[in-house]
Image: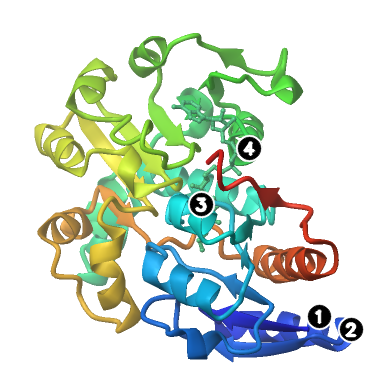
């Protein structure tokens, strides 16, 4: 059995090696993500095991199919970058890792919130210029005095609800499918329009589907409290970036934590080369001390990395041995 591992990160290697030794499977490692591969690149692979935040090009999927690969095992949760129709048309089955560590992303969202409400952007900037009195004059807010609106209460959102409640925040949630585990523990609103005017922080934990694109735009921001904070560790397309920048400019928005940026595909090549991204919207947000921009790293903990590797490899092995995987997704229905 042979798996082609794409988008290999150095920190994953020890977990790949341990799993391969235990399971007697050959792993072919590739640091590059799926892009311009040809069928020859996939020679001998039974499964392609991939991790990337930018789109999977249909041509790479077709090259996999031409090489006889029948399975794609993702090492992550989100599938918004996957061309489902191309997979279906080529008879390639798909699996993801739905819960490698919801806590990792939820903790990051809380961490962004804490940093924003304590003015970390200004404080760090001031201190780096030896402007200590500026840092000393910045008064923050405590989470226990704030109301948090958690949008999406699946695995990650539910963890975020509990973490914020642990800080004493009041939490209001919205999800068209309320989480039974949170019954009696959080107040759900029936409509997002009821959530926007009531919360100090909007924290997003929903998939980046077409329907959710620009869930937050100028109209929604106008309905929010003055001085609202926005936290997006979910997907960049959920927030209309132009509207976010306008909201910051007017002061309506007090700050934003953006781990997932709307135009991530445009800035990703620069991130990879440790260069400044040329995207003007990105530059504007990065230069604003009220904004914390991180390069899609909310997931990145030791626990998450180990689970992403081992669960995706278990999916891959099950695909080869049984034709199905524990976390298989129906590409025809996505
Ligand atoms: P999940 O499927 O467990 O939960 C998602 C929830 O969102 C579901 O309960 C669903 O009903 C709800 N939902 C969908 N559309 C909604 C809407 N318009 N309004 C309110 N609720 C809505 O998924 P999860 O594991 O919690 O992950 C959520 C998202 O987090 C993923 O889809 C992925 O995009 C993102 N994510 C980001 C990172 C990162 O490193 N930044 C890591 C993992 C996942
Ligand atoms: C996900 O798991 O969906 C993420 O956003 C993490 C990323 C490394 C792909």
Q: Name the residue under label 1.
A: 19
Q: How far apart are marks 1 and 4 (CA)?
A: 32 Å
Percent x, y of residue 168: 60, 27
Residue at coordinates 24% horizontally, 25% vertically from top-left?
Answer: 221
Percent x, y of residue 243: 17, 35
Q: Name the residue under label 2.
A: 22
Q: Distance between the residues labelled 3 and 2?
A: 29 Å
Q: Which of marks 4 and 2 is nearer the N terminus?
A: 2
Q: Total number of numbered labels?
A: 4
Mark 4 crowd level (few <14, some 14–19, many ≥20, 10 Å Cα): some
Q: Earlier in the sequence, mark 1 or mark 4?
A: 1
The vertical placement of 49 against 233, above or below, is below
Q: What is the number of the mark on residue 108?
A: none
- For residue 139, say whether it is visible: no
Pick whichever, 282 or 13, lies toward us.
Answer: 13
- SS state under label 3: loop
Pick whichever, 1 or 28, lies toward us.
Answer: 1
Q: Quadrant of the N terminus?
A: bottom right
Q: Distance between the residues labelled 3 and 4?
A: 26 Å
In this rendering, position of residue 227 left or right of residue 284? right
Q: Name the residue under label 4.
A: 163
Mark 1 crowd level (few <14, some 14–19, many ≥20, 10 Å Cα): some
Q: Mark 3 points at which residue?
A: 79
């Amino acid at each position: 059995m042979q798996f082609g591992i794409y988008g290999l990160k150095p920190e994953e290697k020890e977990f790949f090696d341990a799993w391969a030794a235990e399971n007697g499977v050959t792993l072919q490692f590739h640091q590059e993500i799926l892009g311009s591969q040809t069928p020859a690149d996939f020679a001998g692979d039974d499964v392609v095991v991939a991790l990337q935040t930018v789109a999977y090009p249909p041509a790479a999927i077709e090259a996999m199919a031409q090489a006889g690969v029948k399975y794609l095992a993702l090492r992550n949760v989100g599938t918004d970058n996957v061309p489902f129709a191309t997979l279906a048309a080529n008879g390639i089955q798909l699996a993801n890792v739905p819960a490698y560590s919801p806590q990792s992303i939820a903790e990051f969202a809380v961490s962004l919130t804490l940093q924003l409400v304590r003015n970390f952007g200004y404080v760090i900037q001031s201190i780096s210029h030896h402007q200590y009195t500026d840092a000393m004059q910045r008064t923050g807010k405590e989470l226990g005095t704030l109301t948090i609106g958690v949008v999406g209460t699946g695995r990650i959102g539910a963890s975020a609800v509990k973490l914020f409640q642990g800080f004493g925040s009041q939490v209001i949630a919205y999800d068209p499918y309320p989480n039974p585990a949170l019954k009696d523990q959080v107040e759900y609103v029936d409509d997002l329009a009821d959530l926007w005017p009531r919360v100090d922080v909007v924290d997003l934990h929903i998939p980046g589907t077409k329907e959710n694109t620009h869930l937050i735009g100028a109209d929604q921001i106008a309905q929010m409290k003055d001085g609202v904070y926005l936290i997006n560790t979910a997907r960049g397309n959920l927030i209309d970036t132009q509207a976010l920048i306008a909201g910051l400019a007017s002061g309506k928005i007090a700050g934003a934590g953006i781990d997932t940026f709307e135009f991530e595909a445009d800035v990703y090549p620069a991130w990879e080369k440790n260069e400044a991204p040329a995207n003007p919207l990105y530059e504007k947000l990065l230069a604003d001390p009220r904004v914390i921009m991180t390069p899609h790293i909310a997931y990145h903990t030791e626990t998450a990395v180990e689970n992403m590797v081992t669960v995706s490899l278990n999916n891959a092995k099950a695909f080869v041995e049984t034709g199905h995987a524990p976390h298989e997704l129906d590409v025809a229905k996505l």
